[in-house]
Image (tube, helix red, strand yellow):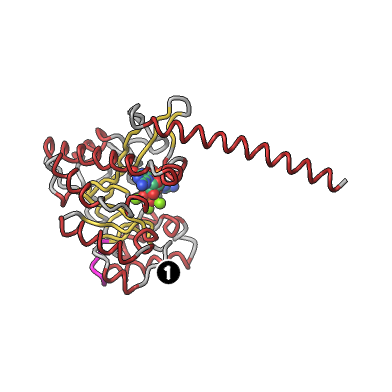
Amino acid sequence: HAKALGRDRYCFFEASMNANAQEQMQLVHDLRRALDRHEFVLMYQPKFDAVSLALTGVEALLRWRHPERGLVPPDQFIPIAEKTGLIVPIGEWVLDEACRQMAFWRETMNAEWTVAVNLSAVQFGHADLVEMVGATLSRHHLDASYLMLEVTESTAMRDVDNSMLILDRLTDMGVRISIDDFGTGYSSLLYLKRLPASELKIDRGFVRDLATDAEDAAIITAIVALGRSLHLNIVAEGVETEVQQAFLTRLGCGSLQGYLFGRPMAPEQIAEAALAPSSGSQDDWRPTRGVEVAT
Ligand code: C2E
Ligand code: MG
Ligand code: MG
Ligand code: MG
């Protein structure tokens, strides 16, 4: 009896694994064509100065407009893109598109904010990353100081010597570096001190429960103190409530990003956000609190 049950179970798992494998293969197949078919779009999430509430930067976040599946979030395809190496050409497209958009904002509205692009560990391991970034900036006549590259703490710490080399070359070029998802990796404080970053982004996981979880609040307090003594701008990501905003601002967090201030949005909406008066309520431009709209 047990054996029969076991066999049934085995068959069940095998069948579902096959379905899953097939689904994955289909996804890889679709992903290979997505660039040629212009199915990728960038949404931009604003980042604000905690005190003045002025727009200080926007982060480019990749979306895949799949013909049948609709808007696919990055968590559902970036891991596959990394495994297949497709993240390299996709990442080049993201950088190119974000720089093109930033150059357009510079030209049309004299934008003084930065555009941030997320880099994957796979791109980071690529020898010609620095040249690729330089070539992209020149192609769009964009000054390097308007570009920020976000590297997660785990990526930066994976192969520290290589990371340090690449980050040094990028900062020599004038590009700014932001350490993303900070607090989830394993930073050696010695390396953190040497990392040529200008910004630390506190992982959303610590921000979420800071009002109710004393340990999360303590960790954030420590990160802000550490960052400030290393002269890094501290950004909190995932700010959703006014209680979180007040706590983070009081601590001395430099910038805030999160649904409270704006979801990832189309570039035209960013232009509106930047033009809105920075004083008072931002309700008049705050776009969609519920849904993300792609144009
Ligand atoms: P990330 O870089 O840490 O980006 C922050 C994520 O948190 C984004 O999710 C953003 O939409 C979401 N978020 C922002 N504010 C809030 C909030 O207040 N509450 C909640 N619940 N979420 C918030 P998204 O766009 O789904 O991106 C997920 C991750 O995918 C990113 O995390 C990043 O690691 C990766 N990713 C996105 N675009 C790219 C890209 O162009 N290249 C690479 N390599 N990775 C990317
Ligand atoms: Mg990021
Ligand atoms: Mg993050
Ligand atoms: Mg993340």
Q: Quarter of the image holding residue 264?
A: top left
Disc 1 marks a residue whose amino acid type is: Ala
Taking the spot 27% from the left edge, 64% from the top edge, the residue there is: 164
Q: 44 or 260, which lies in front? A: 44
| Res. 260 in view | no
Pointer 1 residue: 218
Residue 152 located left or right of residue 112:
right
Q: 2 or 97, which lies in front? A: 2
Report the quarter where the N terminus lies: top right
Q: Main secondary structure of the magenta part?
A: loop
User: Where is residue 52 shown, x and y percent of the image?
Assistant: 22, 53
Residue count near mark 1 (Cα–Cα under 10 Å), binned few <14, some 14–19, many ≥20: few
- Please check the rendered image and state whether residue 157 is part of the magenta-colored stretch, yes or no: no
Report the quarter where the C terminus lies: top left
**Residue at the bottom extreme of this rendering:** 190
Q: What number of labels is visible?
A: 1
Residue 82 located left or right of residue 42:
right
User: Where is residue 155 shown, x and y percent of the image?
Assistant: 37, 58
Q: 211 or 239, which lies in front? A: 239
User: Where is residue 278 shown, x and y percent of the image?
Assistant: 21, 46
Q: Is mark 1 within 8 Å of ligand 3?
A: no
The boundaries of the magenta stretch are 229-233
Q: Quarter of the image holding residue 294?
A: top left
| Res. 80 in view | yes
Q: Secondary structure at mark 1?
A: helix
- Please check the rendered image and state whether residue 232 is part of the magenta-colored stretch, yes or no: yes
Residue 69 located left or right of residue 242:
right
Taking the spot 72% from the left edge, 39% from the top edge, the residue there is: 12
Residue 93 located left or right of residue 289:
left
Q: 263 or 104, which lies in front? A: 104
User: Where is residue 48 shown, x and y percent of the image?
Assistant: 26, 50
